[in-house]
Image: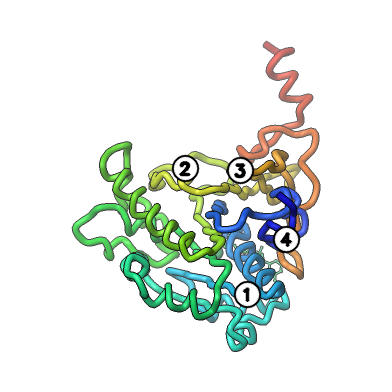
Amino acid sequence: MSSTDRVHTGIPGFDAMLDGGYLPKTTNLIEGPPGCGKSTLGMQFIYEGTQLGEPGIIITFEELPESYYRDAAAFGWDFRRLEHSGLLKVIITSPEVTKIDLERTGGILERTMTEMGAKRIVVDSITHFEAAMVDTPEPTSKILPRKDAKARQSSAPTCTANEDTFAQRDRLYSFLNALKRQGLTTLITREAMYLFGDEEENQIDSGIHFIVDSYTMLRYVEIESTVKRAIIVLKMRGSNHDRTIRQFEIGTDGLIVTQPFEGQEGIMSGIPQRMAASFIKAFVRK
Ligand SMILES: Nc1ncnc2c1ncn2[C@@H]1O[C@H](COP(=O)(O)OP(=O)(O)OP(=O)(O)O)[C@@H](O)[C@H]1O
Ligand SMILES: [Mg+2]
């Protein structure tokens, strides 16, 4: 497949990691801890589309559209102008409404996508959707403001490998499939509830990592008293991809992916050590 068949993210260095970009009409997950750049990556993906004449939609369950206009403007992306010209739509909704709407033929979202000729969509973030799709008598009670993320974790039932998990996976699957049916390339962000690779306690296991076509993980890494950002593509169906863990930065033009972390291991655990040191620990000082 040539790179012209790829959906470019426009993120320097990241497209190369993806062997040119995402495959068209796929579902792509970006997972990472708070503030690591998930929404910026999503906005950049949508902005790149608009520059290529591919209209895009951002669906959010928590942020107001104004915060996207503001954050995008800081990178020089004029989202208001793009909305006026019909290349962009920022939609704030609830997971329940979205799911019901997409299940109907000719729902509001479907009509919007068709009218705009949308090619890209960002769901920022899927975490609320996952929480709302767990079976409980009052599903809306689990949609808490983002500041209560911890509370949401502890109040939302943890799914084990039982019927709940499968039912939830089914709902998630039909939601993401509905977007695919519309011919859109989807990027979904997901909150990871850790800062430096700690264990994810109580995080809902919806099976999303199995459903998506590609899975990219963002992480903070502490190296010699400096916090750096790391990115790795863990899975990409039907494509080759970079398997190194690279650094990325958020600058005046958005994300930029740079060099691999060299001479260190344990990067994704957040606590890297020099390879020589870990070699000595493992083999010499036994
Ligand atoms: N204009 C900018 N210039 C440089 N860095 C910026 C700029 N805007 C944001 N950042 C960096 O990006 C971070 C937030 O990025 P973003 O909102 O994309 O993260 P997120 O992963 O979506 O966060 P959350 O989990 O809170 O939704 C900020 O903490 C800051 O470090
Ligand atoms: Mg965000």
Label 1 amino acid? Asp
Label 4 amino acid? Ile
Label 2 amino acid? Phe
Residue 164 position within the rendered picture, expressed as x and y whole percent measured from the top left: 27, 45
Q: Earlier in the sequence, mark 3 or mark 4?
A: 4
Residue 11, labelled with which disc?
A: 4
Which of the two marks, 1 or 4, is nearer to us in this view?
Answer: 4
Cα–Cα gap, marks 3 and 2: 14 Å
Q: Quadrant of the C terminus?
A: top right
Q: Is residue 249 above or below residue 245?
A: below
Tell me which residue sits at (73%, 53%) in the image. Answer: 20
Residue 71, labelled with which disc?
A: 1
Residue 210, labelled with which disc?
A: 2
| Residue holding disc 3 | 238
Look at the image and tell me whether residue 226 can be seen.
no
How crowded is the residue under tag 4: few (<14 C-alpha within 10 Å), some, or many (20+)?
Answer: some
